Image (cartoon, rainbow, N blue to C red):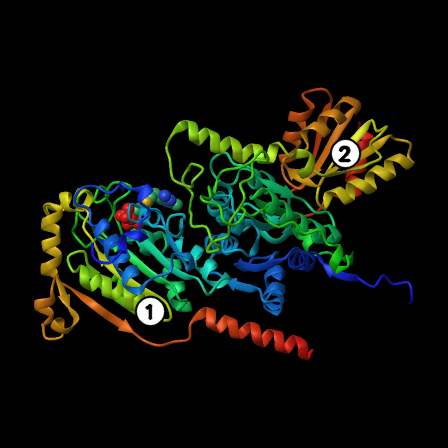
Amino acid sequence: MQGNAERYLNKERLPHIWCPGCGNGIVLGALIRAFDKMGVDQDKTVVISGIGCSSRASGYLDFNSMHTTHGRALAFATGIKLARPEINVFVLMGDGDASAIGGNHLIHAARRNIDITTVIFNNSIYGMTGGQYSPLTPRDCRATTAPYGTVERPFDLAGLAQAAGATYVGRATTYHTGLLTRLIISGACHKGFSVIEAVTACPVSFGRRNEMGSGHEMLMWQKEHGVPVEKAKHLTPEEMKDKFIIGELHKSVAPEYTEIYGQLIKKAQCSYKGE
Amino acid sequence: MTDVIPLARLMQGNEAIAEGALDAGARFFAGYPITPSTEIAEILAKKLPIVGGKFIQMEDEMASMAAVIGASLAGLKALTATSGPGFSLKQENLGFAAIAEVPCVVVNVQRCGPSTGIPTATAQGDVMQARWGTHGDHPVIALCPSSVQESYSLTIRAFNLSEKYRTPVILLTEEIVSHLRERVNLPQPGEIPVINRKKPPAGLKKYYPYRAGEDGVPPMANFCEGYRYHVTGLVHNENGVPTTNPELAQQLLNRLNNKIMDHLDDIVTYDSHLTEDAEIIVIAYGAVARSAKRAVRDARSEGIKAGLFRPVTIWPFPYREVAALSQQARAIIVPEMNMGQIKGEVECAARNSTKVVGLNRFGGEIITPGEILGVIKSI
Ligand SMILES: Cc1ncc(C[n+]2csc(CCOP(=O)(O)OP(=O)(O)O)c2C)c(N)n1
């Protein structure tokens, strides 16, 4: 590994629990490379996660880290960030974690535009509990709780985050790791709520039931189906069918929550003295 | 008027809780509005920023409880306040605070339930939920104020106990106490006993976040104050690393329980009124204890040897004290605004050594002194 990204790993905790072929390690690799490139200070940064296979990542990192309850990572993180705005806050979640049980916390963190960088590991399935469908499982896919194929429409997670007010949104895959690292860096440098969706493979609980092959074949699927933003502009809807856009999807400027709250404190203190 | 105590104020129960929290050093509140607790949020929304603290109205009660835990780990004393349906939603992360040993205070202003029940009516129906509401075996401290004065002082005590024992503490109050307005004598600023969490010494080669000394309470480093460590709701070892080792699991859960149960003398408080020679003892808590006090006095004036025992700490329940009283009393009467939740605990402590009689009302109204006196006289 180039640079000194490994210093961000808590080696006492390795080996990890992830299955052979799982893409979570690739996301974690992209994350620590991003930390390394940014020179993230481990003593001024926290990593918070929910519950799921992907959320175990927080424990493999050498930070003040917290593995919270299913879906609630952003709410815990909001408490930390508001209490101590000078702390850098990263949140790691699975797709079920972020969009089902934690969907409400996701849209409200986005609405507040609180300065938290969120990486969502999207493996299209509930991995930890053994392959039940999530709000991001595509239509007509098989899952243990969708033995005849899913009948529900999936969320467009990035679109959801943007619509709810996230001011930085990107998507990459575990095939496009350079892009993933760059997006995490841009998201972390952006002041406000950032969401980076990392499309990752779960060969054991998703790929197997949907005839997608090995972890390697699923990576190749990501390569073929992830279309960079620039390229997608020139493709027809027909050509984009079954494909998804990767890259920086949205960036805007809006007041950041803890900064506004800081101003509110000053205002309250002035008017109190004036009383 | 010249004899007015300078720091006496007329206050509502919920206001006293907000003031108590501020005086205990609370600097963070996260909540979700719900009757009859809302005034606590409203007052703290106004007052916290003035002292540099933070207030946030979260999207729901799960989130409020989560944010409170996050803020506490980041080093701020933090609380949330809720009622009925909201208390149910807090349970998930209340369990997280218990196993991760994060100090925080949860105010539950009880209202008539279940479900939406009667939002504006008083009740004591959440006594067992306060004890067993989150899943698994876990320690809990819950305090029941009877007056506005006590709403203030027990809020401070709740923070102190949570900091000292690294555990969530529940202030289990009731609509009727929270909406009552009474005089409160406020201590001078320097006179308020404030306890802060014990921190590890600086410069340790390695900090074990869950390694406790004899008192069972591990020193707590706040996040980003020098020691990097992992916090999880999974059963973990002394290093905070998840484990499924049954021995380590047993050890952790035992320590969590013992750090409370080994300090009952410090944690359990109660009030006794005319119990020394009492033959009939009323055991009551919260607002009902006030009716009971009056009933006991009225009984005395009629020559009946009645007394009142009032648990202030409802969890852990004062079993020892109740067991002793059950030896002397001909009967114990337990009036409460539920179907007999504490009566069961009294029976458990009394072990058939005396008769235990319940007096229950759960339709949203307080039990009157006359009703309690009626039961005393019927014995
Ligand atoms: C309140 C609650 N409900 C359900 C669960 C069980 N559970 C644990 S992980 C999980 C889903 C994990 O899926 P996802 O969030 O997509 O993450 P992954 O494991 O795929 O990384 C569920 C349902 C839980 N731990 N808590």
Q: Chain of mark 2?
A: B
Crowd rating for badge 1 (residues with CA inside 10 Å; few <14, some 14–19, many 20+)? few
**Residue furthest out toward the bottom:** A274
Task: State the image coordinates of residue B142 (x, y, percent, origin top left).
Answer: 62, 42
Most foreground residue, B115 or B66: B66
**Relative to A63, B338 lies left or right:** right
Residue positioned 20% across, 62% down in the render = A172
Residue positioned 11% across, 60% down in the render = A225
All told, the count of numbered labels is 2
The three-letter amino acid code for the residue at tag 1 is: Cys
Residue positioned 77% across, 62% down in the render = B10
Most foreground residue, B10 or B3: B3
Residue A78 seen in this snapshot: yes
Most foreground residue, B58 or B119: B58
Could you say which disc has been placed on residue B282 in the image? 2
Distance between the Cα atoms at labels 2 and 1?
64 Å
The three-letter amino acid code for the residue at tag 2 is: Val
Q: Secondary structure at mark 1?
A: helix
